[in-house]
Image (tube, helix red, strand yellow):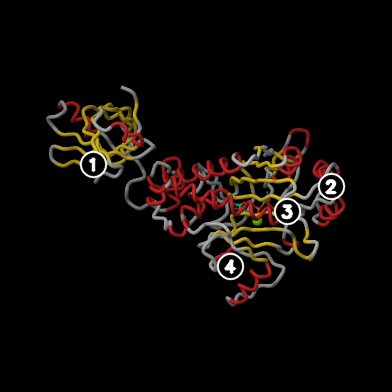
Amino acid sequence: MGRTYIEDLSQHVGDEVQLHGWLYNKRSSGKIRFLLLRDGTGLLQGVMVKGQVDEAMFALADELTQESSFMMQGRVRKDDRAPGGFELDVTGLKIYQIAKEYPITPKEHGIEFLADRRHLWLRSARQHAIMRVRHRIIKAIRDFFDGRGFTLVDSPILTPAACEGTSTLFETPYFDLGSAFLTQSGQLYAEAGAMALGKVYCFGPTFRAEKSKTRRHLTEFWMVEPEVAFNDLNDNMDLAEEFLEYIVQSVLKDRGPELKALERNTAKLESVRKPFPRISYDEAVAILAKKGVAFEWGNDFGGTDETLISEEFDRPVMVHRYPSAVKAFYMKRDPLNPKVALAVDVLAPEGYGEIIGGSQREDDLDLLLQRIDEHRLPREAFEWYLDLRRFGSVPHAGFGLGIERTVSWICGLEHIRETVPFPRMIYRLTP
Ligand code: 4AD
Ligand code: MG
């Protein structure tokens, strides 16, 4: 008899099967033992009745502690009241290991207690649901680009220079070559990829030595970054809204039970349909003014500002044309108003803030050189990047979507720390 998984039980009603996993919970009532098994794909209650199995087997059930690993064999029965729709009439048990006293019990635990035990906390139903949504988001991202003729071009993680400003770089010694920096964004390399392959994306971990201790910041996070030759700012916004709609609708289609387990209000996700509103930075500032916020033109929005702006809309809002002074060196200025950059940030609804940052890129060699000097970046380190403007430069644009902020929003979480298996934050490097 082969191994069966809980998620496949609908194909095995009436069959005798073997399921392998861990004890999630247990109840006894007189001559009956109820064993709740989790196997990573779901939960299943096994029912063992005294007299229907031999004495030794029945005694084994009483040895099982929370998170003990075991195999349970039995016949699958449809039961509409059961969580997954099935129950197992148990005929056999095999114990792999009896777990020592498991630290995470069904009672409430403090967040630091759980975070210190993240390697175990991942086994809880809520974390299970979040990881399943995260995976579906990542699959949607890959399907979206792969289905539209994009080529995956991975960017390096060890890099010689900054991409998103020098203040948040992690530095590490690098043999005889001095220092290397953990990448903040794969974008500059994705631009090289776009000049070679037209439509590309890179997808990998990125690092920011962020001093910010907020519910939106990690020091290590995953980012997907498409880059398209010949796209301008409007094309970039078209791509971003189609992309986000695709991700959200894919999760709604395939992760209903997980969203339900997370008590997510899915009506708020259903409305994530294009077109998304597009407003300029100036219009966003006007929204803040209307709400009584003393905000000075030229500053970047803080988390609270983003929340106030996004509250005006029932779907993500695209804010474009930020003051160039607060944006990265590579962003192209608006020819109609050089004070602003052809940038776009996408703010998620429900107060989740910026999930996408992007722009049309400066494609003129001399202007790009000026920007590099103004930002006091070392020109030598960017020589290869400048070559992209020397040899067949074209208009191009792209953006970066932060995976963890997206997971946080789609799952409706309080804090970004639950969106990634092992979060890295300013005060947390373990487990
Ligand atoms: O706006 P950012 O800094 O843009 C870039 O890095 C560009 N080079 C992307 C590009 O155009 N190819 O970051 C992009 C996104 C943010 O919108 C946010 O979702 C996420 O990355 N992000 C973070 N997520 C978690 N923790 C942090 N510290 C983050 N910083 C940025
Ligand atoms: Mg940004």
Q: Residue at left 52%, top 52%?
A: 416
Closer to the chain start, of discs 3 and 4, is 3
The answer to whether the residues at label 3 and label 4 have Cβ atoms under 8 Å apart is: no
Closer to the chain start, of discs 1 and 4, is 1
Q: Quadrant of residue 22?
A: top left
* Foreground disc of the pair 4, 2: 4
Q: Nearer the viewer, residue 164 or 64?
A: 164
Closer to the chain start, of discs 3 and 2, is 3
* Foreground disc of the pair 1, 4: 1
Which secondary structure, mark 1? loop
Residue type at mark 2 is Arg
Residue found at the very far top of the displayed protein: 1
Residue 83 on image: x %, y %: 29, 45
Category of crowding for the residue at label 1, using alpha-carbon neighbours closer than 10 angstroms: few (below 14), some (14–19), many (at least 20): few
Residue type at mark 4 is Ile
Residue that numbered label 4 is attached to: 309
Residue that numbered label 2 is attached to: 379
Q: Quadrant of residue 300?
A: bottom right
Q: Residue at left 51%, top 64%?
A: 314
* Foreground disc of the pair 1, 3: 3
Residue that numbered label 1 is attached to: 79
Residue 216 on image: x %, y %: 55, 56
Q: Is residue 85 above or below residue 268?
A: above
Q: Residue at left 28%, top 42%?
A: 85
Q: CA distance from mark 3 to mark 2?
A: 26 Å
Category of crowding for the residue at label 4, using alpha-carbon neighbours closer than 10 angstroms: few (below 14), some (14–19), many (at least 20): many
Closer to the chain start, of discs 2 and 1, is 1
Left or right for 352, reference 344: left
Residue type at mark 1 is Asp
Q: Quadrant of the N terminus?
A: top left
Q: Nearer the viewer, residue 268 or 302?
A: 268
